[in-house]
Amino acid sequence: MATIKEIAKAANVSQATVSRILNNDITLSVSDETKLRVLAIADEVDYIPLKTRKKAKRNSRLNIAIVDWYVNKALIGDPYYLYLLTTVEKALSKESINSYKMLKVEGKYISSVNTKPDGIIAIGRFDKDSVKQLSDICDNIVFIDSSPRADLYSSVMINTELGTNQALNYLYQLGHRRIGYIGGKVISDTGLKLSFSTDDRRKIAYQDFIHNNNLESFIFEGNKLSFEEGFSLANVMLKKHNRPTGVFVANDTMASGVLARFKQEGVRVPEDISIIGFNDIPASKYLTPPLTSVKLDMNYIAVCTISLLKEKLENSFFFPKKVLIPTSLTIRSSTMKVEK
């Protein structure tokens, strides 16, 4: 894997700056552009040389627009979608398919080039108005991480229930019986309203696991999944007399906030509390300690998305599909067996 030294050299910043960015140090004063550059370089997905990308663009016959619902500020706060976006771009380049960004400006989608797309890859959560706007531009759409209008459009989703159970079962196998959950409200993945008001599927899977194993429930829930919420909820947990010995956190960015608060308080991870995150973003291996996390295969997500889009483009007789991507568990040093 890439080292912090190699990332620092590629980003033309100091190793200390890289470490602080990857650990979500909110006191660090650098530009948003620098943060995004470091986060992108930290991504381990195979690099596509510029010469290869240019050749692919010359030879390509398809033009695919990529729409990402996050803005730069949000991408810095939770870089999952940034890593997903860059993985999709690289996968399209390998297929010799032209790609370009489509941005939302003052409520309207604007193309970054003067080319009508043959298809659209929409990453994130989109409300009904956004879906209608995109379909007016091009009706060949595949959604990643949401499934609005499943009767019309294919989508690629993550099996969050599977990932949650993989994390919880691992903690259980390590001897943990007081297992907590730290998460927040999420946006619906069905294209209804873009408000943080829906119970996370990870929370629901956690509740089922606790019930099925006759365990005590420890739920700490905020308004959204962010570093700040993780930091705040860890503080709430630390005030409890009866704390969990193991915690499953709804995403890695939130888990980094939990780790930061524990470090402040002198709580040792994993000796005092084991922690598992979700998404296994590239920055997670650089946390202190490196984070055990539920891994999503972003390359597979990208390949499945492109396959669905090509199928739609090449076949007049088409039924929309929903592909559920399986997860796995990347084990690092933030978890350990319960000491008797």
Image (cartoon, rainbow, N blue to C red):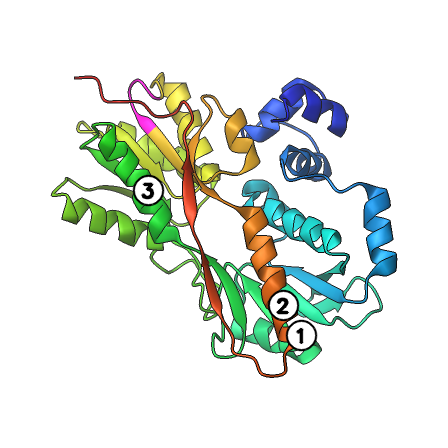
Q: Nearer the viewer, residue 201 or 260?
A: 201
Q: Are marks 1 and 2 in contact (CB under 8 Å)?
A: yes
For marks 1 and 3, give the CA distance.
Answer: 36 Å
Res. 166 mark: 3
Res. 109 mark: none
User: On the image, which quarter does residue 80 sit in?
Assistant: top right
Q: Residue at x 72, y 39 (%)?
A: 47
Res. 313 mark: 1
Q: Are marks 3 and 2 in contact (CB under 8 Å)?
A: no
For marks 1 and 2, give the CA distance.
Answer: 6 Å
Q: Percent x, y for residue 306?
A: 63, 61
| Residue 123 shows up from this direction | no
Q: In terms of secondary structure, what is the magenta stretch mainly?
A: loop
Q: Earlier in the sequence, mark 1 or mark 3?
A: 3
163 part of magenta stretch? no
**Label 1 SS:** helix
Q: Residues within 10 Å of mark 3 (few under 14, many from 20)?
A: some
170, above or below 189, in the image: above
Residue type, mark 2 in image: Leu
Residue range in magenta is 270-274
